[in-house]
Image (cartoon, rainbow, N blue to C red):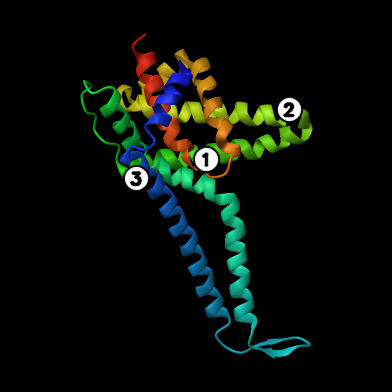
Amino acid sequence: MILTDFAKAIAQLPDPRFQSVLWRGIGLTLALLVGIYAGLLSLIDIFTAGPVTLPLVGEVTWLGDLLGWGSLGLVIMLSVFLMVPVASAITSLFLDEVADAVEEKHYPNLTPVPPVTFWEGLRDTISFLGVLITANLLAVIVYVLLPFAAVFIFYALNGYLLGREYFQLAAMRREGRAGAKVLFKQHSGKIWAAGCLMALPLSFPLINLMIPILGAATFTHIYHRLSLR
């Protein structure tokens, strides 16, 4: 059944609302990286506005150019590591729209729910990103101690975190925060298994950018299936 829910989510990827959330997440991430680079250039201009004298070298005029190109290289290097988590975090701000699109197509008889406010979404996104980063940093210690099990630990850990986050995101819309937690506890094993399925594509560049959307869509289906039992 989980694979059926996942297949439905993949089939709906061409939906304009899915695409809108995806490109907004990527676009805002790129804008953020460009903003960081512009900020670095401004700081470099401030500190290299006047003549710079280096010991044993004397006055130099190329330091600003050197730092400018160096900062570009730094931003590019950071983007390799930050692109996916930052894009995922920003995309998560709009995942309520994905759930709406799924319900409109597959569950048209449901009553509409109030949209999640921007600040509620931001709070939940920051909280989830903090837990995700902290848990994976702590897991590095376990990876060092148990290198033969590192791959399994990575997928098991992130499967649990992704499953809990995306299921509660789908369930909270109709059950409230407390109701979503109760439902999660009742079906934690199935949700963890579905989360592991979401974690598998994390290792594949570009594909991993779609995980928040696929996760939100898949767990919307899972929520409706489990809530009927």
Tell which of 55 and 71 is nearer to you: 71
How far across and how far down the image is residue 51, in percent?
61, 90
Amino acid bearing label 1: Ile
How far across and how far down the image is residue 41, in percent?
53, 73
How far across and how far down the image is residue 221, in percent?
38, 22
Question: The N terminus lies in which quarter of the figure?
Answer: top left
What residue is at 67 percent from the left and 34 percent from the top? 139
Residue identifier under label 1:
207
Task: Tell me if 227 is positioned left or right of 37 in this view.
Answer: left
Count neighbours of disc 2 (C-alpha within 10 A) and say few if under 14, some if 14 to 19, many if 20 or more: few
Query: Element under label 3?
Result: helix
> Of callouts 2 and 1, which one flags the residue occurring earlier in the amino acid sequence?
2
Which marked residue is nearer to the observer: mark 2 or mark 1?
1
Residue identifier under label 2:
149
Task: Tell me if 145 is positioned left or right of 138 in this view.
Answer: right
What residue is at 73 percent from the left and 34 percent from the top? 143
> Of callouts 3 and 1, which one flags the residue occurring earlier in the amino acid sequence?
3
